[in-house]
Amino acid sequence: MFFRKKFDNSDKAVPKGQIDMSRLPKHIGIILDGNGRWAKRRGLPRSAGHRQGAKTLERIMDYCISLGIEALTAYAFSTENWSRPEEEVSALMDLLYSYLISAEKRFAEKDARFMVSGDISRFDDRLQRAIKHAEDVTKDGKAIIVNLALNYGGRDEIVRAARKVSEDVKKGKIDAEELNEQIFASYLDTASLPEVDLIIRPSGEQRLSNFLLWQAAYSEFWLSDICWPDFKEDDMKSAIIAYQNRDRRFGAV
């Protein structure tokens, strides 16, 4: 089910109703969309939009921690994003590296765990080392799991998982006849995370864009015209309240 909020710059009101703290989504996925459009409207380079988007992610992470959300997956760089202009990709890699080298202190202060979904082998050695270090030093964080989807594509994730399953079948670790959804899901990048309850997409687009294709089977969706850098805590509150107003039947009556 899709929820949509029409963006109005003049609308500063707090959403009606309150969040039911007993029915929070355990895992929220966000497609970090609209950074470039945000920058263009202000006559700024696209890299400025990405920097502001990183600050927004930090604020929303803090808000999720305050609520008690268990996991937050942020779609930051897709397998298709390599086709963007070289200058923009380079700026994104530099921004990602800066984010990672400061992760140890910031995540320790928040008692948060950092992890990555996606095929990091395409990144240079510097970035790969920074990712692995950030994951290692924050692995005991309890307040929230922040999962960055980097060089991530839902189709690619499923193909990589299928290859791993095939290898384990050949090695005799699993029986192909016993393969089921639960076993297959254990080979996905998100195997250690709860099911994705809510997916948020800002910026006015109405598609998944190859994000969490397997995991989104029964996710609720909340769409907004707001560009990601302008996304506020009240917008997250609206999304959660909309989610809680849904009757989630998972195919039942």
Image (tube, rainbow, N blue to C red):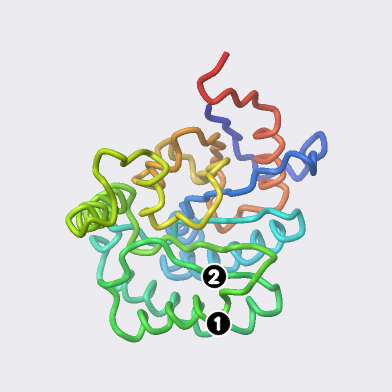
Image quarter in which the C terminus is found:
top right
Residue 227 picture location, percent across and down: 53, 51
Name the residue: 72% across, 48% down: 234
Q: Residues within 10 Å of mark 2 (few under 14, many from 20)?
A: many
Q: Is residue 7 above or below residue 43?
A: above
Q: Amino acid at mark 2?
A: Phe
> Which of 177/227 is in front?
177
Residue 250 picture location, percent across and down: 54, 26
Mark 1 → mark 2, Cα distance in angstroms: 9 Å
Residue underneath mark 1: 137
Name the residue: 70% across, 33% down: 244
Secondary structure of the residue carrying tag 2 is: strand
Which quarter of the picture shows residue 3?
A: top right
> Which of 201/251 is in front?
251
> Which of 20/203 is in front?
20
Q: Does residue 77 appear anywhere in the picture?
A: yes
Residue underneath mark 2: 114
Q: Amino acid at mark 1?
A: Val
